[in-house]
Image: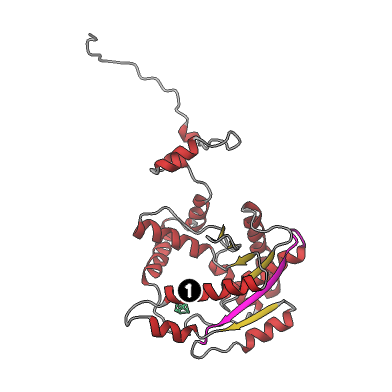
């Protein structure tokens, strides 16, 4: 049963990844992709599914897995290295004491994550350059996307989620998120079935992001209203009606779109012909 469940789940996740890669043209022939493996369930799923995609040969790309040991207390990377060794994947382990630096530079009571992420990003970008990578792959999934969307709408007044792919400001790399439509709970189940050696994300002892937690709970509450709310919200992010927003720049850009981009309309936009006869009229001048 477990093996059937594992292969069914793998197929479903892989279908989603392939659809995202195709829809957003995330990968090209000749790419060298560096998959960032934190050791959490999502990044393991990313590595596994990208490797499956690579073996299918279209597009033809190289994959290298990079893991950064940030010297968190209690860190044990041995099972991760053993798993990578037996997998046959090309990999590299980096080590840098960002933990000490983050602790030293974070004022008491402040959240350390922004500083930590920026250090990690800098280290990974430098490694990507050294390895000749053209693409960095990250393991953000559906729930990350929806929570980011809600955080932006509720707290910053921006209609913005997470892009499936973008080019870094300095133009050095494309950053891709092939799991962006994959459900977190499916990735967690898949990680358990595969027996990935998980490195817990709580080693640093940082407090959880309370706002992100709150919007996570909000999503759970919305599920009581519509059990498929997550899929509906995800579909909405891929089904934008620029004419029905309040951003003038977006409306003008939409108006000036090339003829190859069709208008978006739904049956409810088309006025129906009902007739009501006038029963009272004022005098016309
Ligand atoms: S939770 Fe810890 S390891 Fe993760 S970004 Fe925050 S400080 Fe860094």
Looking at the image, which is closer to me, 193 or 140? Answer: 140
Check the image and name the residue furthest to the top.
285
Residue in view at x 50 percent, y 56 percent: 228
Residue for badge 1: 117
Q: Quadrant of the N terminus?
A: bottom right
Residue in view at x 53 percent, y 35 percent: 263
User: Image quadrant of residue 180?
Assistant: bottom right
Residue in view at x 37 percent, y 76 percent: 111
Residue 239 is one of the magenta-drawn residues = no
Q: Which residues are magenta?
A: 57-71
Please tell me whether residue 124 is drawn above or below residue 237 in the rendered image.
Answer: below
Question: From the viewer's perspective, is 67 left or right of 63?
Answer: left
* Residue 219 percent location from the top left of the image: 42, 62
Q: What count of labels does the image hold?
A: 1
Which SS class for mark 1?
helix
Looking at the image, which is closer to me, 127 or 203? Answer: 127
């Amino acid at each position: 049963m477990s093996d059937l469940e594992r292969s069914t789940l793998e197929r479903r996740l892989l279908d989603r990844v392939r659809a995202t890669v195709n829809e957003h043209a995330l990968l090209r022939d000749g790419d060298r992709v560096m998959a960032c493996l934190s050791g959490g369930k999502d990044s393991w799923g990313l590595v596994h599914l990208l490797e499956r995609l690579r073996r299918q040969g279209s597009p033809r790309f190289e994959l290298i897995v990079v893991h950064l040991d940030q010297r968190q207390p209690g860190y044990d990377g041995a099972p991760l290295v053993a798993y990578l060794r037996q997998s046959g994947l090309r990999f590299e382990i980096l080590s840098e004491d960002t933990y000490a630096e983050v602790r030293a530079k974070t004022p008491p009571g402040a959240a350390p994550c922004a500083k930590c992420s920026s250090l990690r990003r800098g280290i990974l970008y430098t490694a990507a350059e050294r390895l000749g990578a053209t693409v960095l792959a990250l393991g953000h999934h559906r729930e990350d996307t929806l929570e980011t969307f809600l955080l932006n709408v509720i707290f910053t007044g921006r209609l913005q989620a997470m892009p499936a792919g973008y080019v870094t400001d300095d133009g050095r790399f494309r950053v891709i998120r092939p799991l962006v439509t994959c459900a977190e709970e499916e990735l967690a189940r898949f990680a358990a079935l595969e027996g990935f050696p998980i490195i817990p994300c709580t080693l640093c002892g940082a407090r959880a992001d309370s706002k992100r937690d709150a919007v996570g709970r909000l999503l759970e509450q919305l599920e009581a209203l519509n059990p498929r709310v997550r899929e509906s919200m995800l579909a909405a992010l891929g089904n934008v009606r620029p004419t029905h927003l309040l951003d003038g720049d977006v409306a003008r850009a939409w108006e000036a779109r090339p003829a190859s981009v069709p208008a978006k309309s739904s049956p409810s936009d088309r006025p129906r012909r009902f007739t009501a006869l006038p029963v009272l009229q004022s005098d016309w001048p």
